Every structure is written in C-alpha cells, then in structure tokens.
C-alpha cells in the first residue's frame, strides 16, 4: 500500500536550543526514567551527576566533606571544593559541552568528561538552583525546567569556597517518584569506600571510610570467608580478594569513583588476572572458572578520560589507561606522516591490571603462606564438582537430543540464526529476551504474539525441583533445569549468556508464585551473577481488565483497578485474570511489547543468599507462614469490587 506523500521542507528542520534536546530525549543522557524503585532509575542518576562533581573536586585535592540532604523530592548537595568560576556559573550549568573537565589540568581523573551531567540535571528538574562560593563572593542562578529565571553576584559572603546545588526532579518527566532511603544510603556508602578520607553527610548521618575497598568487602560479607580478605593498593589501582563457599563470583568494580555495575574492560582484566596468577603460583593448569569459583572481591582503578558505554556510566569501554591527542608546545595537535592526528596512549587496561595483580598477589601469597592451602583446596573442590557435574549434564543433554526434547521446550528467536543480524550481533543481543513460562497454554500465547526476532520462549513442564533442598548432582540430573541451562548457554561461562533479559512469566496464582520462587531459587543458588548483573526479571501481567463500552483499562494492582472503576464510572465490567492463558493473544501483545512491565530481581552485596533461600524455601515454616499471612491478599480480597 502506497504511503501518503509528505512535504519535506525547511519547516521540517529544527535546531534544539540549550537543554531542549535533553528534555526531548532524556534516555540518551540518563538512561531510564523510572519512579525511584530501581537503583538505575533516572532520579538517582541526577543525584550521582551532582555528587560526582564534588568527588572530582576532592580527587584534585580540594574539599574533604560533601553534604547531601533529601527532603521529599527536593535534593541539595554542598561541597567545599574550589567552586565554579564565578563568571561561568550559568554556562557551566546550562550550555551543552561547556565545562572544566575538558581541561586536563583542572580535572585529571574525573568521572564526568562530556560537559553534560549538570546540564542534564538542570534540564530534567522542575526547579534548579546553583550557587558558587569563591573568596567572599558568590554567583548564583535559578532555573525552571532548564530555562534560566534569574541570576546574580553577591558580595561579602561569609561562606567557605565550594558549590551548592538544589533541585527537584520534574514530575512531567518522572511522573510519581520518590527517593528510597536504602538506595541512596547504599550509593553514599560506596562513595565513601572509594574516596578514603572524604566524609559524606547524608541527612545528618556521616559516612567515611579509612580502609577503602577493604571496608566495603568486610562490611558486606554475609558468610565467613575462607581466609582474611587480601587488600592490595598501588598507584591508580586498588583491589580486594577472598573466597567463600557460595557459587559464582561476586566482584564489584569501580572507575574514578564510579560504580560500574555492568563491569567492563577493568573487571574482565581482573577476572583474567586472578586465574592467571593463581595458576602460575601453584604451577598447575587449573581451569580459570575453578580459580574464581566463590570469589568475593572488588577492583577500583583511576584512568584519564574514561570511555563509558552510555551516559549512565555503568560499563567501562576504554582499552587504554589514557588516550588523548598528542600536542606540541603551542597546544596544537601533532599530525602523523599520513595526515591523521597523533594519539598519545598509555598501557592497556588489561596489561596494567594483569601486571599489578601478577606481581602483588604473587608477593602476598609468598609472604602469607597460611592462606595458600585454603585457596588451593577451594580450587580443587571446585574442579572436582565441575568435572562431575559436567559429565552428568553432558549425558542428560545427549539423551534429550535423541528424544528431540529441545525443539519442544525452546522457541528461539531469529537473531541467533540470521546472517542479516550477524554484523550487529551485540545490538540484537542487548534487545534479546527469553520468557520462562509454565505449561503449553501460557507459552503458546506468548509464542504467538512475541517479537520473533528478539524474543524466545522456554516452556517449563510442571514445577522444577527445589534446588535449595537438593544436591548439585540432583540438579544436574534434572531434565527441566538442564535444558534451561543449555537454552541460556551458560554451561561453561556466564559471558556466553545468549539473552540479555531472562524473564520469568508465571501465572498470578498460588501455583504460579510457587513456580516463580523455584526458578528464582535455581538462579540465586547456582547463577547469582545473572541476578547481580541485572539479567533476571519478573514479567508483570495485569490482574484485572476494567472496561465499559467506550474504554478498556488493564490494571496491575487493586489500587489501579479502583482508579479505573472510578474513572470509567458507569457500565463497568471487571475481569480477573488468574492465568496467562486466560488473556487473549490480541490483548497479550501489548504486555510483552513496548508497554511491557518488568520487575528486576535484585540482589545487593549486603544480602545473604543462604539466608534468603532458607527463609523462602527452607524449613522455617512458622516464620514463612507469618510473613504470608501478613502480606498476602486473598483471592476474595482481589475480587471484591465495589461498583
């Protein structure tokens, strides 16, 4: 069918002034918006951008205190650094690509380098106020939704040098939102561990670390480690390392004080260096996964001009410790013989981290022989279990292949097979999802309406076994879970994960909730890093459909249902959905498309996996029953409609 012709003239060309582009495309600058329920939501990015500037001042040797106050939706941050140059306060807070961090002399190893952070906070705030104090004077400016309202200079100000910023995120952008105290506290604690000697005062409570990452690990350990954490520091690098009995790896990573929760080149180098150094120390060709099994640790590095993937800076993409244009004595970029710009590069991050760990960890092991047998016993135990389980899984997979079980369990997505997307595999993987469903009805509904390019469906048969109560051998012999491991592609390494999003999609009834808990127990016990890396989610599906002759609304809670009833008023029909199979294909397409609601499964460093699983899946029946009685709505309560 031919499209209707549309005129394309000069009137279609727009130039977005000032911070207008940020408001139009906020995701480009702060990632997701969100309502504050998730640590990655935009309101925390706004806070982080302002605090990062204060930390950068401390890193350059100015100011030893940062005050943060949050009252309702209003945030204020006061540092005692150098203060923004008084004549540049308006430019530094409202003009894109304007800032001091383009000048290496002023900020050598800062987090924010693109001149956007503070402008994004300004643009996405209902109100924004900044005041810079310098030598008895101050310069201030106030904004509304990024538009300057007023500004001025004050003389004779009795304030220490530094910068004060106060803002309220814009409800037009973020909707109903709130700052969760526990998320902000965790964020501030991490800052204190990474900047020894810098005090953070959050709503009157002081957070300050004297031992850096060692404090981070010691305060967050939930089980007794096999040996005292090893703490090693050098110029531009700090690491902590120990082993525990939990499965997987739990390694936090940071760059220039920024928590890179999605890792990057520095974390990959650290993981490689741990295995390489231990293999060389013991002079045995241990499998790297066995060397890292049960590792608890952290790495922090300082580099110049870091390249983060995405504005939210959660993954380091840099290859080198520094990489910048080579300039002559007049500041002019030097040209190569072929006419290209000459680039001054430092050592690769991989080489820098490997060399540091190889030298310093090896020295530590020679100087502390008491920890040597504990580490090797852990490696050998991991090797023995891995080899035994690998053999069992291989036999199970071969048996299932002969029975052609895979084709019945997994409806894969096209990005794994299409030559067309091979060139942009990573981009497609970022979009890819696998729905873990129960039964043929639900999987059939999702399969029918999914985006077959990027969405796969794995169908469970009945309830999986309770992994918490079973041995690792029994789990390996289980057909359902073995096939799931194979479908995910994580038999040998989590980096081989075939889908970015693992989505548990079960019915909103007792059986569905139980199956959900069993699946999450499996991930929590044997693949906790999938949760820590943010890959595991729960699909929200509507509990109710509320409609009249003119409008239909889908409601995910009792409160939403009541709001819909009040809005639609007369002639209202309410349907309670108890299973995914009850929702028609025409309706379901919206629930797994652009409007899909996902609850991320979260696991913080402070939480004990064994304690969580014991509470929900163990034998503490009375405690769990009291919890259920207190929190569970009965079916009668859900269906009680007051029209």
Image (spheres, rainbow, N blue to C red):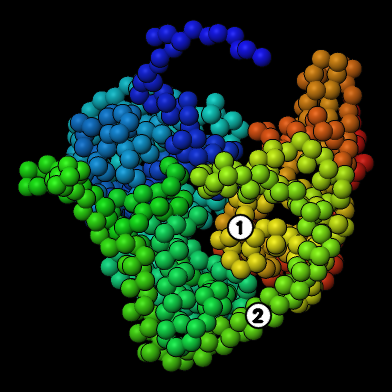
The correct choice, above or below, for 99 with respect to 285 in the image is: above
Outermost left residue: 329
The front one of 451 and 637 is 451
Secondary structure under badge 2? helix
Q: Residues within 10 Å of mark 1 (few under 14, many from 20)?
A: many
Residue at x-position 37% and y-position 65%: 350
Q: Is residue 312 left or right of residue 477?
A: left
Residue at x-position 36% and y-position 54%: 318
Residue 197 seen anywhere in this rendered image of the structure:
no
The quarter of the picture where residue 260 lies is bottom left
Residue at x-position 89% and y-position 17%: 571
Q: Is residue 95 left or right of residue 103?
A: right
Q: Which residue position is annotated with label 2?
A: 387
The front one of 424 and 598 is 424
Question: In which quadrant is the C terminus drawn?
Answer: top right
- Measured as percent of width and height from the top left, residue 598 is found at 68, 43
The correct choice, above or below, for 72 with respect to 604 in the image is: above
Q: Which residue position is annotated with label 1?
A: 497
The front one of 22 and 60 is 22
- Measured as percent of width and height from the top left, residue 155 is found at 19, 31
The quarter of the picture where residue 612 lies is bottom right
Question: In which quadrant is the N terminus drawn?
Answer: top right
Q: Is residue 576 left or right of residue 234?
A: right
Secondary structure under badge 1? loop
Outermost right residue: 636
Q: What distance separates the C-alpha of mark 2 from that of mark 1?
A: 21 Å
Residue 280 seen anywhere in this rendered image of the structure:
yes
Label pair 2/1, CB-CB below 8 angstroms: no
């Amino acid at each position: 069918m031919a499209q209707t012709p549309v005129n394309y003239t000069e009137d279609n060309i727009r130039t977005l002034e000032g911070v207008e582009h940020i408001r139009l495309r906020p995701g480009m600058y702060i990632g997701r918006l969100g309502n504050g329920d998730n640590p990655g939501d935009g309101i925390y990015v706004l806070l982080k951008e302002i605090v990062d500037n204060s930390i950068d001042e401390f890193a350059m040797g100015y100011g030893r205190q940062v005050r943060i106050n949050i009252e309702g939706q209003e945030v204020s941050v006061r540092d005692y650094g150098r203060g923004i140059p008084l004549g540049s306060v308006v430019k530094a807070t409202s003009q894109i690509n304007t800032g001091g961090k383009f000048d290496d002399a002023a900020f050598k190893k800062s987090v924010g380098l693109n001149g956007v952070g503070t402008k994004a906070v300004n643009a996405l705030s209902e109100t924004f106020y900044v005041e810079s104090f310098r030598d008895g004077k101050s310069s201030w400016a106030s904004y509304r939704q990024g538009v300057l309202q007023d500004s001025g200079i004050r003389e004779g100000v009795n304030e220490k040098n530094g910068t004060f910023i106060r803002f309220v995120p814009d409800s037009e952008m973020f909707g109903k939102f709130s700052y969760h105290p526990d998320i902000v506290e965790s964020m501030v604690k991490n800052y204190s561990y990474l900047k020894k000697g810098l005090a953070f005062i959050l709503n009157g409570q002081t957070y300050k670390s004297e031992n850096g990452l060692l404090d981070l690990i010691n305060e967050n350990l939930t089980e007794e480690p096999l040996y005292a954490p090893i703490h090693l520091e050098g110029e531009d690098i700090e690491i902590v390392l120990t082993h525990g009995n939990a499965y997987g790896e739990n390694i936090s990573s940071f760059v220039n004080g920024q928590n890179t929760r999605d890792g990057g080149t520095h974390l990959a180098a650290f993981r490689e260096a741990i295995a390489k150094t231990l293999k060389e120390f013991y002079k045995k060709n241990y499998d790297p996964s066995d060397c890292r099994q049960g590792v608890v640790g952290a790495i922090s590095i300082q580099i110049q001009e870091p390249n983060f993937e995405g504005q939210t800076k959660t993954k380091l993409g840099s290859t080198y410790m520094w990489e910048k244009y080579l300039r002559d004595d007049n500041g002019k970029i030097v040209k190569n013989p072929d006419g290209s710009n000459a680039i001054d590069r430092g050592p690769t991050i991989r080489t820098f981290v490997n060399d540091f760990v190889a030298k310093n960890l090896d020295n530590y092991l020679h100087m502390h022989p008491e920890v040597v047998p504990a580490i090797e016993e852990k490696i050998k135990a991991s090797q023995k279990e891995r080899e035994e389980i690998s053999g069992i899984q291989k036999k199970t997979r071969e048996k299932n292949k002969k029975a052609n079980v895979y084709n019945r369990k997994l409806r894969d997505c096209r990005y794994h097979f299409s030559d067309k997307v091979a060139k942009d595999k990573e981009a497609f993987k970022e979009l890819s999802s696998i729905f873990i469903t129960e039964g043929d009805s639900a999987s059939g509904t999702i399969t029918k309406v999914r985006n077959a390019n990027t969405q796969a469906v794995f169908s469970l048969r009945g309830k999986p076994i309770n992994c918490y109560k079973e041995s690792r051998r029994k789990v390996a012999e289980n057909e359902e879970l073995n096939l799931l491991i194979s479908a995910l592609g994580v038999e040998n390494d989590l980096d081989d994960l075939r889908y970015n999003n693992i989505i548990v999609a079960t019915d909103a009834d007792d059986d569905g909730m139980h199956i959900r808990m069993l699946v999450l127990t499996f991930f929590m016990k044997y693949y906790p890093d999938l949760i820590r890396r943010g890959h595991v989610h729960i699909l929200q599906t509507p509990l109710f459909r509320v409609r009249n002759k003119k409008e239909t609304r889908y409601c995910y809670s009792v409160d939403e249902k009541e709001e819909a009833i009040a809005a639609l008023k007369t002639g209202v029909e309410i349907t309670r959905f108890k299973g995914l199979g009850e929702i028609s294909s025409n309706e379901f397409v919206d629930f797994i498309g652009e409007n899909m609601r996902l609850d991320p499964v979260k696991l913080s460093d402070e939480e004990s996996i064994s304690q969580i699983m014991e509470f929900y899946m163990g034998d503490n029946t009375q405690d769990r029953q009291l919890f259920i009685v207190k929190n569970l709505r009965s079916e009668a309560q859900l269906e009680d409609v007051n029209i």
